[in-house]
Image: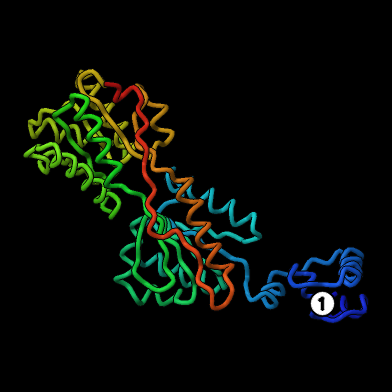
Amino acid sequence: MNIYDIAAESKTSISTVSRVLNNKGNVNPQMRRRVEEVLKKYNYQPSAIARGMVSKTMKNIGILTVDVRENHYARMIYVIEQDFSSRGYNVNVCSTGGSVRECGRYFEILAGKQTDGIVLIGSVFNELSEHPEITSLIKNIPVVIANGKVELPDFYSVLVDDVKGIRRAAEYLYDGGRRDLAYVIDKDTDSARRKMEGFLEAMKLRDVPDGPERVIRVPESSLEGGFAAVCQIFEKGLSVNGIVCGQDITAVGVIKALKRRGLRVPEDVAVIGCDNSPYSRICEPELASLDNKPELLGRMCARILAARLEQEDGEEAETETGAAIQPELIVRESARL
């Protein structure tokens, strides 16, 4: 049975059937009842393609991230997926592995599926502004970036104030008497660089002359990255009684490495991580961490994209672009001063 058969049996027009199916426009209650009786009689389920032809949308959303297994990203993806599922959208989640080439491949796939909107999770996508050949694949699709920014038409952003978050963490330790601090940067992304900038700001505001020398770079955010950071600190001969890390998992590695060297946390060295992930609560001692509120970030991204998709022709979508989420320092045993 198709829409023409339904219109014929319910003795109404095709446009009325369409409005009933899509719950749009004013429909005479008696007409609506006749159409609904026919739909129920034949257990009619319109296909996604048919709905798309009528409503001019396939109700598809794409979410791209570096790695869906990373806890911080997964928490955002869950919130966005739940929000759009409740709105009747199909949600496609893609992992790019940080590769621009893979990003382009997924853009091509999503465009082919007539995707209505895309959410990009992570500041790694900032580099898309340098690849017009890739962004041109989705030139008619609105995009929201979580904690990133691309200066292109129909791209929207929700940012986390990484600079202020890490600055507050460093100031908490310094003002609490831990004057010999180090910062561990464990990623090569815009967000990671902003975090490092926050640490350097805190050192400058406290007149610490060797702030840049107290930045420790490791190749990855991992337990091994934490061990490597502690090795570098000792090899440099740095006097350290407080360490701030860009990721929780790296901070857990730092704690394990310090313990193996016979140091106590927090008595000898206080440690703070970032993300407020499950790692922060299962390590011993429990890890103090910056909560950068991924669920809130996900909700804001979903709200902005939904507003953009639901706007009427000629209207401008109301967005919260420009507002920055403020991380909150969660103090636990590893930094109890």
Residue at the spot of label 1:
16
User: Left of 77 or right of it: where is 121?
Assistant: left
How many badges with numbers are in the image? 1
Residue 132 is left or right of residue 52, and the answer is: left
Residue 263 occupies which quadrant of the picture? top left
Give me the residue at 13% from left, 29% from top: 180
How far across and how far down the image is residue 319, in percent? 47, 62
Residue 188 appears at what percent x and percent y? 26, 52
28, 47: nearer the viewer: 28
Image quarter of the C terminus: top left
**Residue 279 appears in view:** yes
Identity of the residue drawn at 32% across and 70% down: 129
Residue 124 placed where, x, y %? 33, 58
Is 330 placed above or below 63 here? above
Q: Is there any visible trace of residue 109 in the rendered image? A: no
Mark 1 Cα-neighbour bin, 10 Å: few <14, some 14–19, many ≥20: some
Q: Secondary structure at mark 1?
A: helix
Estimate the x, y position of residue 171 in percent, counting from the top left: 22, 34
Tell me which residue sits at (79%, 80%) in the image: 15
- Badge 1 amino acid: Thr
The one of 231 and 154 positioned closer to us in this rendering: 154
